[in-house]
Amino acid sequence: MTHQGLCATLRLMKLRTYPDPVLLKRSETVENFDEELREKVAQMWDLMYDKGGVGLAAAQVGWSVQLLLMNPSGSREDRDAERVVVNPKVIKSWGKEKSEEGCLSFPDITVDVTRKKGLRLAWQDEHGKQYEEDINDFPARVIQHEIDHLEGVLLVHRMSPVDRIRYRRELEEMLASGTTG
């Protein structure tokens, strides 16, 4: 991609909200760990922090690849907590925990979601380097939420029937308003 083409792609990066069809697609494996990927990752970090998130999947910016970012602290200054996760694979998981979750693609909606308490994750970083690690508690929840996005599974799919009724008006407004945020 030319520099001009890359700049146009980055300029178009914006948060996608329900019911944008890209959010429902299963993402493709990342094969090229190049400068374009790293530039998009940098743009995603800015967008995530600007929106007050702790995680962001590539699908949420209209990029249908197996890539997510997370910083459980949500602080731009806490660079040590940042993790770029490419082509994640959950090797095993354990425990269960129900907790409240929100989603940048579903503004102002929070629901209780049951997730695994911990998991063993294999992934690559934005340079293609391989990792494998046990991740527990809130970071494990963030990873699972973002992996859902990579599989086309959304917060609305995790809602209980009571939550669907509780947020019916908001969901209907999102459906009526279009596909991007």
Image: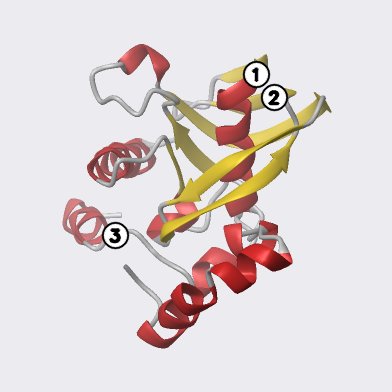
Which residue, given by chain and number where applicable, does mark 3 sit on? Answer: 14
Labels 3 & 1 near each other (Cβ < 8 A): no
Residue 120: x %, y % from top left:
74, 21
Answer left or right for 29 relative to 10: right
Q: Closer to us: mark 1 or mark 2?
A: 1
Which residue, given by chain and number where applicable, does mark 2 sit on? Answer: 121
Which residue, given by chain and number where applicable, does mark 1 sit on? Answer: 135
Answer left or right for 82 relative to 8: right
Helix, strand or loop for disc 1: strand
Answer left or right for 83 relative to 12: right
Quadrant containing the N terminus in the rendered view: bottom left
**Circle 3: residue type:** Lys
Give whichever of 114, 3 is nearer the camera: 114
Residue 66: x %, y % from top left:
57, 46
**Circle 2: residue type:** Leu
| Above or below, comparing residue 178 to residue 18 in the picture | below
What residue do we see at 57% from left, 42% from top?
A: 100
Labels 3 & 2 near each other (Cβ < 8 A): no
Classify residue 38 by image quadrant: top left
What residue do we see at 57% from left, 68% from top?
A: 166
* Residue 30 visible (yes or no): no
What residue do we see at 53% from left, 51% from top?
A: 65
Labels 1 & 2 near each other (Cβ < 8 A): yes
| Above or below, comparing residue 127 to residue 163 in the picture | above
Helix, strand or loop for disc 3: loop
What residue do we see at 79% from left, 31% from top?
A: 96
